[in-house]
Image: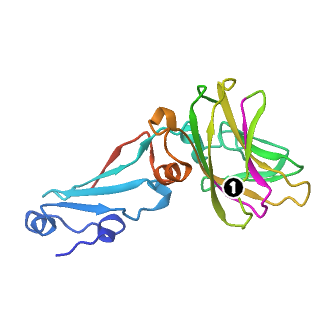
Amino acid sequence: MDYTRNTWVNGASPAINATNLNNIEQGIVNVTNPDYDTTSDLSGVRSSVLSGNTNGALTQIVSGESAVNLLGDIGGFYRDSDNDGVADEWATVATTSDSISDQIQSFTATSQFGRFQSKLLSVTSGDIIHFMVDVETTSSLMAVDVYDGVAFKGTFNPFTGSGSFETGSFLYTADATSAQLAFWVTDYRSSGWTQTRVRKCKVINLTVEGDASLSLAQADLKYAKYFDNIGHATINQK
């Protein structure tokens, strides 16, 4: 009896009893890179183990990368507690039509340098920071600014303005004057502003994670998919 991955993960679980457990390797199925519903935010899944018992209970153990997003869960734009259209602990400046839907922050600049900005994050001089965010824009003049609460520390322009979501990333080394950093998604156009959408913002301190030697390409590959400081999760189903 062949129970496929989709039967287990996406469909109704078949009846489990002592006889058919032997047909699925004593009730344990190893799955590599399973295809989960993205609304569950399990994009960092590396492997999954499903185990059944004679009572029909199904335990799913999911393992993935473990890292600390300095933004915590606010990097996922999950909440807008005051219903102002802007994700909690973020702010917009010189924008209109701010809104959140499906963990995507939308805004439209009303003047040059209209932006969506994070809170200030604590860092230590010399720390190497990996920043990654998905941005949908029709302008190649959309950029990410780094600000330390006093002065601008750098501007990065990784977006082509394709009109589809693009992942932009860069490495930044905190200097001697930077005890904190904020990241701004900024529209540098002087006119003709159109809607910008932002999702999945991650700020990883590579120095703290023991990955200071990684290149940008290596950091992108490692941290594109991960759990926020969770090595595994166990989900009981019946």
* Placement of 176 over or under 195, stated as above or below: above
- Specify whether residue 147 is painted magenta: yes
Which residue is at the front of the view, 212 or 87? Answer: 212
Q: Which quarter of the figure is the C terminus placed in?
A: bottom left
Q: Residue at x 67, y 43 (%)?
A: 87
Q: Which quarter of the figure is the N terminus placed in?
A: bottom left
Which residue is at the front of the view, 9 or 131? Answer: 131
Stretch in magenta: 134-148
Q: Position of residue 206 (x, y in %)?
A: 51, 38
Q: Of helix, strand and loop, which mostly describes the magenta segment?
A: strand
- Specify whether residue 201 is painted magenta: no
Q: Which residue is mark 1?
A: 158
Numbered-mark total: 1
Res. 22 image quadrant: bottom left
Q: In the rendered image, is residue 103 in sight?
A: yes
Which residue is at the front of the view, 5 or 149? Answer: 149
Q: Element at badge 1?
A: loop
Q: Residue at x 53, y 52 (%)?
A: 220
The residue most toward the bottom is 1
Q: Position of residue 148 (x, y in %)?
A: 72, 30
Dot 1 amino acid type: Pro
* Placement of 124 over or under 73, stated as above or below: above
